[in-house]
Amino acid sequence: MQKSKLRMIILCGFFIGITAILAQMEIPLPLVPISGQTLAVGLTATILGSKYGAITMTGYTILGGIGLPVFAQAKGGLGVLLGPTGGYIFAFIIAAYVTGLILEKTSYTMIHAMLANTVAMIIILLIGTIQLKFVVDLHWHDAMIAGVYPFLFVGLIKAFLASWLGITVRKRLIEARLLQSPVGPIQA
């Protein structure tokens, strides 16, 4: 039991690092850049599940919040969390939990992973856009133009990649006994 918990803590730390690295891969846009963070959220939740996915994203948010440069553009601090893009980061925690929960309640298949990661994308975009709207004082239409529309197509691509890579890696980690098998059958 202790060995299993230690293994999961190590995996959470590993995925915090993956998220920090993917955050640095970005396409700049005026208010909110397209980054690899959301891909990392999907990968993390698809592989680790609801509990550890949410723990990982909470750890990532805390590390960035205390000033470590883990967010996009190697930024960190409360200013980022309270700024225009902070809502997206806070939403990572909820999105990771919901993604994992959908997979735990259904099955770890590509179709369910794609559904779960698409739902997560919507959660991130909605929560992020709400904070963006109020912090920048935008009208709802302008907030949607800045915070949702540019990310829909890329978000679906990231949802697909997170699903495909996540299911594949999860299956390999279970086979290597580095991750516990779900209660139901493993499917790919």
Image: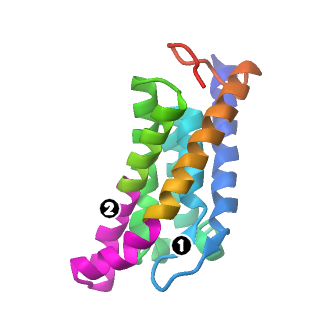
Residue 126 marker: 2
**Mark closer to the observer (2, 1):** 2
- From mark 2 to mark 1, how far is it between C-alphas? 22 Å
* Residue 163 falls in image quadrant: top right
Q: Find out whether residue 125 is within the magenta segment.
A: yes
* Residue 131 falls in image quadrant: bottom left
* Residue 60 falls in image quadrant: bottom right
Determine if residue 158 is in view: yes
Q: Amino acid at mark 1?
A: Gly
The magenta region covers 123-151
Determine if residue 51 is in view: no
Nearer the observer, 144 or 181 = 144
Instruction: Look at 36% across and 54% down and name the residue there.
Output: 123
Give the structural element (helix, strand or loop) at label 2.
Answer: helix
Q: Residue furthest right?
A: 176
Where is residue 122 drawn, in percent x and y? 37, 55
Q: Amino acid at mark 2?
A: Leu
Residue on which disc 1 sits:
77
Label 2 packing within 10 angstroms: few (<14), some (14-19), many (20+): some
Where is residue 26 drawn, in percent x and y? 63, 72
Instruction: Look at 61% across and 48% down and name the residue there.
Output: 161
Q: Is residue 5 shown above or below 135? A: above
Nearer the observer, 157 or 34 = 157
* Main SS of residues in magenta: helix
Quadrant into which the C terminus falls? top right
- Indicate left or right for 84 with 41 as reference: left
Give the structural element (helix, strand or loop) at label 1.
Answer: loop
Numbered label tally: 2
Nearer the observer, 20 or 38 = 38
Instruction: Look at 53% across and 72% down and name the residue there.
Output: 77
- Indicate left or right for 169 with 139 as reference: right
Q: Is residue 76 shown above or below 183? A: below
